[in-house]
Structures are given as structure tokens and as C-alpha cells.
Amino acid sequence: MNIIKRDIEGVVIIEPRVFEDERGYFFESFSEREFLAEVGECHFVQSNEVKSSYGVVRGLHFQLPPHAQSKLVRVAKGRILDVAVDIRRSSPTFGKYVAVELSDENHRQIFIPHGFAHGYSVLSEEAVVEYKCDNYYAPESEGAIAWNDADLAIDWQIPTDKVILSAKDQKHTSLAECKTLFE
């Protein structure tokens, strides 16, 4: 696996070795041994799959301690723009983000550690996103930031009039207004 470190500590892009021939392709989507050696310790306890159509923006979501989640995200079908926002108040990169295109063609994955809000936009007609978490979902610890926070100025690569949001994601506040974040 090829590890691409980003400007924000802890967030990494993972490119697997893909073996292709006339039958198709093969790659390891996860190897605990390689993950530990290249990224660090993380024990995944939950795996999720989400199907969405073009224009859907999910996020920016996070869970606070003691239920904070690290995530390993990949796309099984389609193409997304995946975004991780640093919400650790004491971090020199607080309020900065990493955005990366993940697809069924590039097979890239992104590892997002505790202390980040996470979201993505669907760039293809349909996308199936799979992600592993190192903690179980706990609704009482959930937090979120508005997808269109002007200070973050994330280009979701979707025209605003085509964005599809859940009722819940339409109501989130900006990062500056968010009262509960990571220290």
C-alpha cells in the first residue's frame, strides 16, 4: 500500500496495490498488519455502507469523546469528494480541511482520525461508500458543522442548486458557532 500524507497531521490517503489482468482486478482493501505499520494503531469495530445519488452531500459529522470515531473510507461504486475538517481547537491546522476524490476506479481510501468532522459529496450518478469505524455510533455524542460554512469555503464540486441534504444536515451551525468540539 502507498501512504500519502497530507498537510494535516493524522489524515492519510491510502492507495492499495492493484493487480489487474484479463479477468479483472484484485487488491487488499484492508490489512491490519500493513495498516499498523504504515498508519498506526486503530481497532475497527463497525463497518457501514451507504448508497447515495448524484448531488447528495452528507456531513460534516463527528462524534465527541468518549465515543469519538476514526474512519477508514472507501468507495465500492461511483465517485465522491471526501472531506475531513480538523476540529481540534489546540491544533495548528484547526479549521483546515483535506479533500480527496475517492472512486471505484482509483481505489483510494482516506483515514480520518479522532478530532475531525467528516463529509462527502456524490459526484457520480450513484455511489456506494463503505467505511470502518473504531467506535460504535452513539447518537448522544453526535455533532455536526454546516456543509456550506462560509469560513471553510469547501468546494463540494456540486452546483448549489443540485445539492441534496437530509433535513438534519440542513440545520447545522458553522464551525465558529459550534460550542462543543475537540480540545
Image: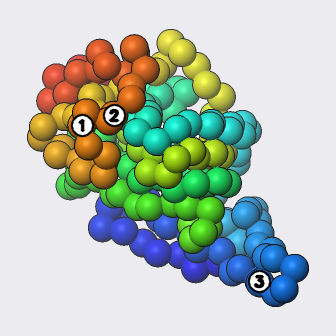
Q: Earlier in the sequence, mark 2 or mark 3?
A: 3
Q: Dot 3 lies on which element?
A: strand
* Gap between marks 2 and 3 measured at Cα: 36 Å
Gap between marks 1 and 2, in whole Å? 5 Å
Instruction: Find residue 96 and report its horizontal and vertical position in percent.
Output: 23, 52
Choose mark 2 or mark 3, whichever is in front: 2
Whether 100 is drawn above or below 144: the answer is: below
Callout 1: helix, strand or loop? helix
Residue behind mark 1: 160
Q: Which residue shows up at 41% across the image and 61% down it?
A: 100
Front position in the image: 130 or 113: 130
Q: Quadrant of the N terminus?
A: bottom right
Is the Cβ of the residue at disc 3 closer than 8 Å to that at disc 1?
no
Residue denoted by label 2: 163
Residue 47, visible in the rendered structure: yes
Front disc: 3 or 1: 1
Pinpoint residue 113: horizontal percent, then vertical percent.
48, 49
Indicate the position of residue 134 as horizontal and vertical percent values: 64, 41
Question: Dots 1 and 2: beta carbons under 8 Å?
Answer: yes
Q: What residue is shown with label 3?
A: 19
Q: Quadrant of residue 41?
A: bottom right
Mark 1: amino acid: Thr
Residue in view at x 55 percent, y 61 percent: 103
Identify which amino acid the numbered label 3 is placed on.
Phe
Quadrant in the picture for residue 50: top right
Q: Nearer the viewer, residue 23 or 37?
A: 23
Residue in view at x 84 percent, y 85 percent: 22
Which is nearer the eye, 83 or 67? 83
Q: Residue at x 77, y 83 (%)?
A: 19
Q: In the rendered view, tell whether residue 70 sits above or below residue 79.
A: above
Q: Amino acid at mark 2?
A: Val
Task: Find the distance from the CA under tag 3 to the CA under tag 1.
Answer: 38 Å
